[in-house]
Image (cartoon, rainbow, N blue to C red):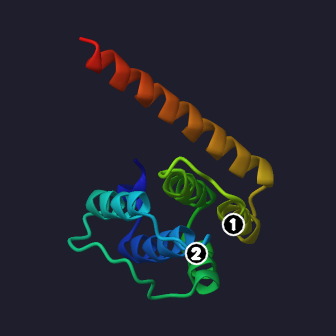
Amino acid sequence: MYLNRLNPEQKELFLDLCIHAAMANGTFANDEKEMIALYCEEMQLLVPRYEAETDKDTAIEELKKLSTPQELRMILFEIAGLVLSDNICDEDEKLYINDFALKTGMEKACVDEAISVLTELKSIYSRIDAFVANS
């Protein structure tokens, strides 16, 4: 939704963070791979990748240097969307998102709000799907 606003370096670092986030619980789910492929398409990266090129902490530090607070919130939102793509945000994934927020200067309440908004959005999409299916 917001990824096309990032510059090329931010996009690559964001992709690294997505890969680390997908692996936070030790399982790289197919839903997460599909979401990463969609993110790559949105960012106009021709070939999705599923191997990180930068470790998590370095990617966070670099993004923090390159990004505005608004861009960091966009990145947090999109990473939360990734971990919720399989409809489960387990403890390891929550810790990952909270760690990103902490290291980029965001409050835990920001994480909670992002997850809440995304959960509402998924519910609305489900209602739309049900509406269309019943036509």
Considering the numbered disc 1 on the image, is that residue within a helix, a strand or a loop? helix
Q: Residues within 10 Å of mark 1 (few under 14, many from 20)?
A: some
Residue 14 position within the rendered picture, expressed as x and y whole percent measured from the top left: 47, 70
Q: Residues within 10 Å of mark 2 (few under 14, many from 20)?
A: few
To which residue does mark 1 refer? 92
Q: Quadrant of residue 53?
A: bottom left
- Identity of the amino acid at label 1? Asp
Which badge, 2 or 1, is on the more N-terminal residue?
A: 2
Contact between marks 2 and 1 (CB within 8 A): the answer is: yes
Q: Is residue 96 above or below residue 1?
A: below
Q: Is residue 127 above or below residue 5?
A: above
Give the total number of marks visible in the rendering: 2
- Identity of the amino acid at label 2? Gly
Taking the image as shown, residue 3 lies to the left or right of residue 123, namely: left
Q: Residue at x 43, y 22 (%)?
A: 127
Taking the image as shown, residue 30 lies to the left or right of residue 89, namely: left
